[in-house]
Image (tube, rainbow, N blue to C red):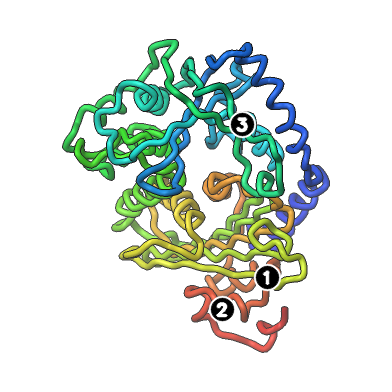
Amino acid sequence: MKLDDYVEFEENERAERRRLAREKSYELMDHLESFQHRFEEATGGDSVFGSVSPSIFVGSSNYPDLSTGLLSPVGHEREAEKFETSGAWYEEGVSISDVFERRTSLLNSTQGVDARNVSDAWDGFLGVQREVAIADRPVDVEVFLDDGPDLDFDVTADDVATPTGPRARAADADLAENPHVPRPVKKTLEDDDWRAEGAMTYLYRRGFDVYDINTVLSAGALGRDDQRRLVPTRWSITAVDDTVGKYLRGTIRDRRSVDTVQVWRNEYLGNAFWVILAPGDWEFELVEIKSPGSIWHPDPEGDTYLSAAHENREGRTGYVDETAGAYYASRFGVLEHLSERGRQAKVLVLRHVSDDYWGPVGVWQVRESVRNAFEGEHGEAETFEAAVREVAEHLPVSLARLRKKSTMVAGLQSSLADWTT
């Protein structure tokens, strides 16, 4: 499909999605207020809370002294699997409100712990947490709360900006069943000399998705025995995207390049992604364009904000600060596609965050949007420059501004028309 035909097709599809999109919803407030009633029914008035835990959460504040917890859906135990972040959320087409409701339905039963003292943590609360993390399905647990629930139901604007469920201090926890642990995970646990990076790659090659791997890593269940640590959830997500991404980059390093300039596009939750693949050695750049009124750029009267990060064939030597986890998540989605095709390419990803993105749902939506951008039709252009120029016409910034920020666009020849906004 030629690029101009493809863009017209995508514009029509986007208009239909806008027509069907829900209005921004703050029903979250009422939802949180109803949580207390569900919790009281679940505990029966005592400090024992029986539920099904689909996942864990490890905080990052004050590392290595941090808060770590079991996540349990209150009143939705039979649907526990739906409350664990995964690619299935994209397939289901969850909205921002859906994400907020699911996350705020999870009771986070927490304990304080030193992240460095967990290599043999198979007893007590930490042991239960690790069993939940390595299991391949939600686990029945009993949580003993310390002096009853101490939950904060004072909902503020911050709760909307960063949706998390209520918390309770846990004294202990017990398993109510024997979790099923997949054989490859057992293998990584038993090998005390296996570096965490190698274990992550091994699990991915055995068919585990990055969501499963980052939970195991977060629980301190990967790596050499004396180096195993609890890894804050936010850190583990990026670590897995980066590590598996580097592995995938190695699989395409000596492959032939794509032979045409291809433009792929996807839009989800107010984020539009344009992915341009062009002939050449591996090169990657993410440019984020954040519109006024979006969650990361809330001033409705402000100017459009741009950020970018880039790597060449040899990769990067340091962490990406400007685009953070979105860089590694989008790069992973592209590399997965190229590895499956057995090709390499130079790649430019343009992410437009519109004001429809009124609440943060996490980098999973970046990862899944890019992964799924490669489904269906794509456009083609004669040159990389032609592709960038055509896509730029559908962005809220001029090509001149894009050129100033983007390493890959900077080399394109300029014209007077590029300087219009």
Q: Mark 1 = which residue?
A: 304
Residue displayed at 34% across by 49% down: 243
Which numbered disc, 1 or 2, marks the residue that appears first in the sequence? 1
Q: Residue at x 70, y 61 (%)?
A: 298
Q: Residues within 10 Å of mark 3 (few under 14, many from 20)?
A: some
Q: Position of residue 203 (x, y in %)?
A: 33, 35
- Residue pictured at 43% horizontal, 59% vertical: 258
Dot 2 amino acid type: Arg
Q: Nearer the viewer, residue 356 or 373?
A: 356
> Residue 403 got which mark?
2
Residue on which disc 3 sits:
151
Work out how far the residue at label 2 is from the one at label 3, CA to CA, in angstroms: 49 Å
The image quadrant of residue 65 is: top left
Q: Which quarter shows the C terminus?
A: bottom right
Mark 2 neighbour class, 10 Å CA radius: few under 14, some 14 to 19, many 20 or more: some
Apparent side of residue 14 relative to residue 261 in the rendered image (left or right): right
Three-letter amino acid code of the residue under disc 3? Leu
Residue ranking furthest to the front? 147
Question: Does dot 3 land on a helix, a strand or a loop?
Answer: loop
**Front label number (1 vs 2):** 1
